[in-house]
Image (tube, helix red, strand yellow):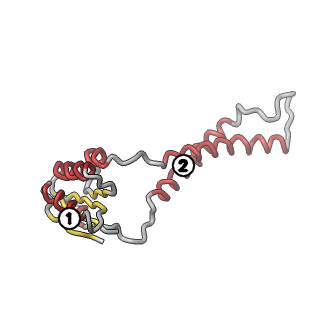
């Protein structure tokens, strides 16, 4: 994938560059930051994560399984005590809750790894080691026709270095 990578020393210039890139209809933008910053998240305007769907589905499956197993066991091996119902939902609520939390949390971890494509077997395109030591990096996907436009926009916002990447 072709693109342009720029290194910035200041957070404000990085945010303004990202905002201008989005105004110019550059959509595939990656930001590298030494620390998490909410300003960068707001500038990127990333869509909401789909991991919560994994949590919901896993929690509902765990809850269903947590009720189904004890009810099935009670019906399969009934212990009739004093005319009470063999399968009552009230004592099985604890098991349902615990399995809801267990399966929901495990599916959340699975969804997080699956959607972030971990483990990555290839290096991230455009990564520079100095982005872990204090500089901010912006990588924007741009073909050969739009790369000069992206480079000029990033330089105009005070990028320390701008280069084309593959």
Q: Position of residue 36 (x, y in %)?
A: 29, 50
Q: What residue is drawn where x is 31% and y is 58%?
A: 30
Q: Which residue is mark 2?
A: 54
The secondary structure type at the circle numbered 2 is helix
Residue most extreme to the front: 145
Are circles 2 and 1 on residues that touch, CB within 8 Å?
no
Q: Which residue is mark 1?
A: 148
- The foreground one among 9 and 34 is 9
From the viewer's perspective, tell me whether residue 149 is left or right of residue 105. left
Q: How many numbered discs sit on the rendered protein?
A: 2
From the viewer's perspective, tell me whether residue 94 is left or right of residue 133. right
Query: Image quadrant of residue 39?
Result: top left
Which quadrant of the figure contains the N terminus?
Answer: bottom left
- The foreground one among 98 and 166 is 166
Q: Against 79, is 163 above or below?
A: below
From the viewer's perspective, tell me whether residue 70 is left or right of residue 3. right
Q: Position of residue 98 (x, y in %)?
A: 61, 42
Q: Against 86, is 158 above or below?
A: below
The local crowd at label 1, few if under 14, some if 14 to 19, many if 20 or more residues have their Cα within 10 Å, is some
Which quadrant of the figure contains the C terminus?
Answer: bottom left
Q: Position of residue 108 (x, y in %)?
A: 51, 50
Q: CA distance from mark 2 to mark 1?
A: 41 Å
Residue most extreme to the top: 83
Q: What residue is drawn where x is 20% and y is 68%?
A: 163
Q: Position of residue 141 (x, y in %)?
A: 31, 62
């Amino acid at each position: 994938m072709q693109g342009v990578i720029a290194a910035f020393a200041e957070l404000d210039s990085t945010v303004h560059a990202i905002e201008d890139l989005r105004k110019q209809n550059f959509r595939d933008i990656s930001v590298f930051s030494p620390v998490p910053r909410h300003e960068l998240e707001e500038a990127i305007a990333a869509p909401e994560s789909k991991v919560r769907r994994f949590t919901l589905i896993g929690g509902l499956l765990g809850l269903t399984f947590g009720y189904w197993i004890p009810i099935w066991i009670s019906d399969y091996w009934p212990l009739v005590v004093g005319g009470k119902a063999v399968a009552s939902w009230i004592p099985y609520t604890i098991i349902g809750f615990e399995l809801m939390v267990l399966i929901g949390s495990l599916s959340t971890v699975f969804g997080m790894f699956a959607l972030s494509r971990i483990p990555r077997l290839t290096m991230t395109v455009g990564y520079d080691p100095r982005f872990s030591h204090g500089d901010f990096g912006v990588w924007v996907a741009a073909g050969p026709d739009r790369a000069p436009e992206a480079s000029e926009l990033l330089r105009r916002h005070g990028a320390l270095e701008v280069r084309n990447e593959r």
